[in-house]
Image (tube, grey):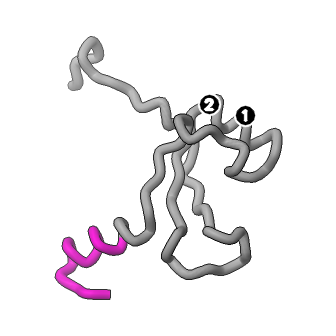
Amino acid sequence: MPDTQTETHSPYTNGPYVVLSDGSTYDGAEGCVIAYITDDGAKALDECYEFKGVEFGDMELITLSDLMDAYNQVHGTNL
């Protein structure tokens, strides 16, 4: 059982969201990210319905390129 006194909790509790680089219905992987956001970030997103309104400090971003690299490493592929 984890020690709750030393366990840290991420403030990025909302998500994951797929954010396309140009906001279209499909896009290339370059420039796209998976985003997790804080509660403040979620409020900002609810107000304007686009990630441009979320402060950078309220987001944790993982690029699709990094996810693809990790997939390739785990599965021994080169997609």
Q: Please name the amino acid that badge 2 sits on.
A: Asp
Membership of 78 in magenta stretch: yes
Q: Residues within 10 Å of mark 1 (few under 14, many from 20)?
A: some
Q: Residue at x 51, y 62 (%)?
A: 33
Q: Is residue 69 above or below residue 42?
A: below
Q: Residue at x 72, y 44 (%)?
A: 53
Q: Is residue 10 above or below residue 66?
A: above
Q: Are marks 2 and 1 in contact (CB under 8 Å)?
A: yes
In this view, which residue lies farthest toward the right?
47
Q: Position of residue 74 (x, y in %)?
A: 20, 72
Regarding mark 1 in the picture, which secondary structure is present there?
helix
Q: Position of residue 54 (x, y in %)?
A: 66, 41
Q: Residue at x 66, y 80 (%)?
A: 26
Residue holding disc 2: 39
Residue holding disc 1: 43
Q: Residues within 10 Å of mark 2 (few under 14, many from 20)?
A: some
Q: Is residue 66 above or below residue 4?
A: below
Q: Residue at x 27, y 68 (%)?
A: 70
First to last magenta residue range: 68-79
Left or right for 48, reference 21: right
Distance of mark 2 from mark 1, alpha carbons? 6 Å
Regarding mark 2 in the picture, which secondary structure is present there?
helix
Choose between 28 and 10: the one closer to the eye.
28
Membership of 64 in magenta stretch: no
Left or right for 67, reference 32: left
Q: Please name the amino acid that badge 1 sits on.
A: Lys
Q: Quadrant of residue 77?
A: bottom left
Q: Quarter of the image containing the C terminus? A: bottom left
Q: Position of residue 13 (x, y in %)?
A: 52, 36
Left or right for 6, reference 44: left
Count of number-bearing discs: 2
